Amino acid sequence: MNKEFKVRFAPSPTGPFHIGGARSALFNWLVARHQNGKFLVRIEDTDLARSTRESEENIKKAMKWLGLYWDEGIDVGGENGPYRQTERLPLYNAAVQRLLEEGKAYYCYCSADELEESRKEQLKEGKTPIYNNHCSHLTEKQIEQYKSEGRKPAIRLRVPKDGVFAFDDMVRGHVEFQAAGVGDFIIVKSDGIPVYNFAVVIDDASMGITHVIRAEEHLSNTPRQIAIYQALGYEIPKFGHISLILGSDHKKMSKRHGATSVDEYRKMGYLPDAVVNYLALLGWSPKGEREIFSREELISEFSMKRVSANDAVFDIEKLNWINFQYMKKLSPDELFQVALPFLVEAGYVSLPLSLEKEQWLKDVVWFVRDHLYYGAQTPENVKIFFETHPKITDEEKISIMKQENSAVLIRQFADALDALDPFDEDSIKKCFSFLMKKTGIKGKAAFEPIRIALTGETHGPGLYAMIALFGKKKSVQLLKDSLQYC
Ligand code: GLU
C-alpha cells in the first residue's frame, strides 16, 4: 500500500509569522489538499532562548486567519504527538541512545575554545573547517579524564568521510553535497537539547512525513539530515526547497520593504483570500496568464512542478491589485465590515452605531469603494464626510471662486437644496441641471466652484451622490460658508 501523502509546516516560534513562513505553509497546505493527503503542523521550539508561546500563538492565529487549517499537530492532536519539540525530548533521547549503542554517534568533550582553535588552523591551511574527529575514538581513560575535569559532552554523529549526499529536490532537481564537507556534526548539545537537524529528522520520520517542503535556507541542512536518516535506517522523504522572497530592490525581504508579517497585513485590512492568492503566485507560475484564483482553483491547479527555483520578488503593487479584485467582489455589508474598524480607529465613529448611522456609513463606504485597495485606506477616502475641509488658500482655486458667476450659482444652489424634497442623488442632479439651464452657467464654470465649495478640491467623487450623503444641512452650510471666497 502506498504511504499516505503527508506534508508538514514546522515553524520556529521566534517572532511574528513572516510572509515567507506563510508561503511555505501555504505551499504545503495546497499540495496536501491537492493530493488528498494530510497537512501537519508542529512547533520547533528547541531554541529555548528565542522561542516564545506568544509567537506560537501569533503563528497559529495568522494561519487560521489565512484559512490554512491543519489535520494533525499542535492544538488539534493526532497519533504522533506531542507536537511541540520541547515535549518530545524522550523520543530524541531514545534515538540518540540507539545511535550511541550502535557506535554511530559518540560523545565529544571538546571545549568551545578547542573547537575554535581547530577551526582557525583549518582555515589557515585553506580548508573548509569541519570537526577534526578529536573525540571520535577516545579511550576509557581519556573519557574518565574529561569527566573528572567536569566537561559536559555534546554528542556527534559519525558521518561517512567520502561519497556524496544526493537527492532529487522537487524544486531544484538533482542536488549533491560532498560528504567530506559535512564532518561529524553535533546532534545533541552539551545541555542535552538536540539540535534542529536531529529533532527534525526524528519528527519527520516518526510523523510519517513523505514530502518536506520548506525554505531554501534549509537546503544546506539537508545533507546532514540525510546522514541522520541513513544512520537510523529511516526512509528518506522527498525534499523541496522553495526560494527566498526578496524585496523590490532584490535584497532579502526585511522591514525596510514594508510590512513583513502576516498580522500586519491583517491589521491593514487585507482580505485573507487575496493574501493567499498573492502568496501562491510568489514562486508558483500557473498555466496561462490568469492571476486570480479561488482557493478551490488553487488546490486543483497548484503543482510543485511549476514552482520556480528563482528568487521571488515581493511586489506590494501586485498584492494591492489582487486585494482590490477581491474587495470588488464584496457586498456592501461585507465591505462595511472590512472598513468599520478603521473608521472607529480614525475616530470618525464610535460603537455602538444607531441603525440609521450604520446605514449611512455603509452608503459612504460603498460610495468610495473604487478607491479602496485595502481596509486601512478607508479613512483617507471618506474624510470629506467627517472633517471640515481646510481654508482655501490655493490661488487657482480662489480665482475659480472669484469668477463672475460663482457666487450667484453657489447661492442659488444652496437655496434650491434647502428647499429640495426628497433629498436624494436623483433629485439633486435634476435640481442642479435645472439651475444650470436657468442661469446659463455650465460645464467647468458650474462644477468647479461647487466642488471647491463642498470639498475644497476641484476633482473628486460623484458630485450628486456625495451631496446626498453629506445631507441637506451640511451641504447647504458648506455652500454658504464658501461664499466668503467669492
Ligand atoms: N523550524 C524551521 C524554520 O522555522 C523549519 C524547518 C523545516 O521545515 O525543516 O525555519
Image (cartoon, rainbow, N blue to C red):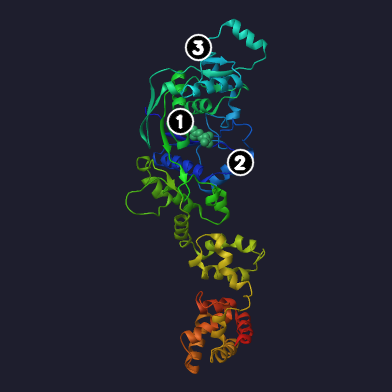
Secondary-structure class at tag 1: helix
Secondary-structure class at tag 2: helix
Q: Is residue 415 above or below residue 459?
A: below
Label 2 or label 1, whichever lies nearer to me, is: 1
The mark found on residue 103 in the picture is 3
**Residue under numbered circle 2:** 55
Q: Of marks 2 and 3, which one's residue comes earlier in the chain?
A: 2
Q: Is residue 335 above or below residue 180?
A: below
The mark found on residue 220 in the picture is 1
Q: Is residue 233 left or right of residue 141?
A: left
Residue type at tag 3: Gly
Q: Of marks 2 and 1, which one's residue comes earlier in the chain?
A: 2
**Residue sticking out furthest to the left:** 288
Residue 38 locus on image (x, y percent): 45, 36
For disc 2, the neighbor class at 10 Å (few under 14, some 14 to 19, many from 20) is some
* Residue at screen point 51% across, 48% down: 66
Q: Quadrant of the C terminus?
A: bottom right
The Cα–Cα distance between marks 1 and 3, rounded to whole angstroms, is 25 Å
The mark found on residue 386 in the picture is none
Residue 192 locus on image (x, y percent): 61, 22
